Image: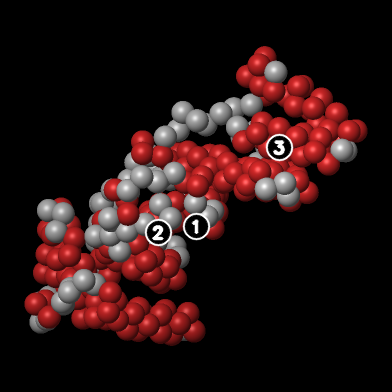
Amino acid sequence: MQSKVVNRLLCVMFIAISLLLVSCGGKGISIAAYKGKSAQKVYKLGKHFLKKQGYKDAIAAFESLNAQYPFSKYSESGNLNLMYAYYEYGEPELALVIINRFLQLYPHSEHADYAYYVKGVIEFENHRNILQKYLPYKMSEHDDEHHILAFNTFKQLVKEYPKSKYAKDAIKRMLFIRDSVASHVVSIAKFYFDRKAYIAAIARAKEVIQHYEHTPAVKDALRIMLKSYRKLGLTKLADTTEKVWKVNFTKPAYKQHHVSTSSIKQQDLPKPAMISSKVK
């Protein structure tokens, strides 16, 4: 009984948020045109617009469905489509609101893996909107906060839904993120080294070696550590680091012990597709 009350309260909150999203953040989206139409009709219109890539109209339809029929059999599928519509419409923040509420309302949904996947992709893309996606972008040159969030989201997806059709791409993105975050930390280490802050450079390089082993960035991290120790006159530490570098990064050893994911290109990773969820 208590769980039903909680779910109903969550649904009421979801309605209020949906109305707020439409009125404040939806780029002129209005749900008035769907007032009085049946839940089935509104849902079918939303699906029709989505298939035609009319994301603005699809958003309006699915938001109207939330507002008018929050407890209908179309709600779960409607919100799955709504999160995708917001994503494609270039409103990643609004898509995340829908995703997070969806996972609260339907934690055991058979399509929860899709929600986690779209969430991870949005975080992976660093919350860039539709215009920013067309600008040059290199993940390793940007703050890694959202990328770490994406890694954790994909990790949760793979852990909870190992047989999901999204798991393979999630793993590929996790490898890409790991390499990119390691490269980002190395770039910070180099920044410190270039400014003669050798202790700070060593600390960042150690972070890569300890937390991002088997990434291509480890090679550069060891090199920065070696040069920093030399600059500080710490001969023994420098010699030890040099031995580690030679053992691990002479060509035969490097090929044998290190797996590079450089063949994974960010632009080659697939985008989320419209989900084909059935109303039960």
Q: Element at badge 2? A: loop
Mark 1 vs mark 3, foreground winner is 3
Residue named by callout 2: 127
Whether residue 124 is visible, yes or no, is: yes
Residue named by callout 1: 146
The mark that comes first in sequence, 1 or 2, is: 2
Q: Is residue 95 left or right of residue 221?
A: left
Q: Is residue 39 above or below residue 167?
A: below
Residue under the image location 85 percent in, 29 percent down: 239
Q: Is residue 213 above or below residue 151?
A: above
Separation of marks 1 and 2 at Cα, in angstroms: 8 Å
Q: Is residue 112 left or right of residue 200?
A: left
Amino acid type, residue under disc 1 in the picture: His
Extreme-front residue of the structure:
195
Q: Is residue 197 above or below residue 280?
A: above
**Circles 1 and 3 in contact, beta carbons < 8 Å:** no
Whether residue 256 is visible, yes or no, is: no
Amino acid type, residue under disc 3 in the picture: Ile
Which residue occupies the foreground of this view, 197 or 189? 197
Residue named by callout 3: 224
Residue under the image location 87 percent in, 38 percent down: 233
How did the renderer colour the structure?
Answer: secondary structure
**Circles 2 and 3 in contact, beta carbons < 8 Å:** no
Q: Is residue 207 left or right of residue 22?
A: right
Quarter location, residue 39: bottom left
Q: Quadrant of the C terminus?
A: bottom left
Amino acid type, residue under disc 2 in the picture: His
Q: Position of residue 186 (x, y in %)?
A: 63, 42
Quarter location, residue 37: bottom left
Crowding near the residue tagged with mark 2, few <14, some 14–19, many ≥20 C-alpha atoms within 10 Å:
many
Mark 2 vs mark 3, foreground winner is 3
Crowding near the residue tagged with mark 1, few <14, some 14–19, many ≥20 C-alpha atoms within 10 Å:
some
